[in-house]
Image (spheres, rainbow, N blue to C red):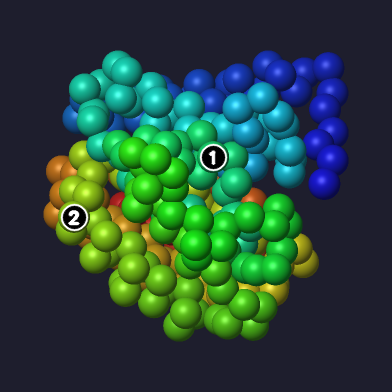
Amino acid sequence: MGTAIGTESAAIARAAAGSLVHACAEVASGALDAAFLAVRPPGHHAERDLAMGFCLFNNVAIAAAALRARSGIERVAIVDWDVHHGNGTQHLFEEDPAVFYYSSHQMPLYPGTGYARERGRGAGEGATLNVPLSAGDGDAPFLAGLTEAFVPAMEAFRPQFVLISAGFDAHRDDPLGGLSVSTEAFATATHIVREVAARHAGGRLVSVLEGGYDLDALAESAAAHVRTLLAP
């Protein structure tokens, strides 16, 4: 899948990544309780030296690296529920035991990575957890991946900060995927991840927008996501 750029693309992509880094620093310091970044372009397909899948820079990976370098955070968990597997995020951290990458995604689908057997490499083996889903699965398998795989894994990993790659293209109305997830399920997923952050990371949680290509579904899902982040 090509990645089109224009004369201002690099500056816009730097602003997107930089705003996420800043928000994470604010949450890490306690100045903010949590944050959601509605930025474009998305980032989770971007590899170390390759833009792809509409992504120029890997926003969530840059933020995770900055947290560890500048904020004294040692262990970061990344939850990616975009309908597409975040190949770039996985590859950037697959040998790093201090960044746990969880992804649920539709398979087969672009970019063709994210098999359950992909669990990390070397020192990072076991810090990658892929939950491939099938077209039409709907809410139950989507949420079960979080409750039955991600939550138990976090009991052992004990993250100090949680990042969400919040793609909403798994929605049943999205034209680029077929998982048939409801708006309400995104709210439930947010609650599950928020509880993990509260239990292990002092509530430190930042979410960043990834995919979402039906504008109504995207707006409804992002609103449900933010309402759940703001709930008492």
* Mark 2 lies on residue: 156
Q: Residue at x 66, y 78 (%)?
A: 135
Q: Residue at x 64, y 82 (%)?
A: 136
Q: Nearer the viewer, residue 44 or 47?
A: 47
In the image: residue 112, left or right of residue 59: right
In the image: residue 20, left or right of residue 216: left
Within the image, what quadrant is residue 150 found in?
A: bottom left
| Residue type of the residue flagged with mark 1 | His
Tell me where residue 33 appears, x and y as whole percent: 25, 39
Q: Secondary structure at mark 2?
A: helix
The disc at residue 91 is 1
Tell me where residue 3 appears, x and y as whole percent: 81, 36
Q: Nearer the viewer, residue 14 or 217?
A: 14
| Residue type of the residue flagged with mark 2 | Ala
Q: Few, some or many C-alpha atoms within 10 Å of disc 1 (few <14, some 14-19, many ≥20)?
A: some
The disc at residue 44 is none
Tell me where residue 50 appears, x and y as whole percent: 71, 29
The answer to whether any part of residue 219 appears in the image is: no
Q: Disc 2 vs disc 1: Cβ atoms closer than 8 Å?
A: no
In the image: residue 16, left or right of residue 26: right
Tell me where residue 190 appears, x and y as whole percent: 37, 61
Q: Residue at x 50, y 65 (%)?
A: 116
The answer to whether any part of residue 151 appears in the image is: yes
Where 188 falls versus 201 (above or below)?
Answer: below
Q: Distance from label 2 to label 1 (Cα)?
A: 22 Å
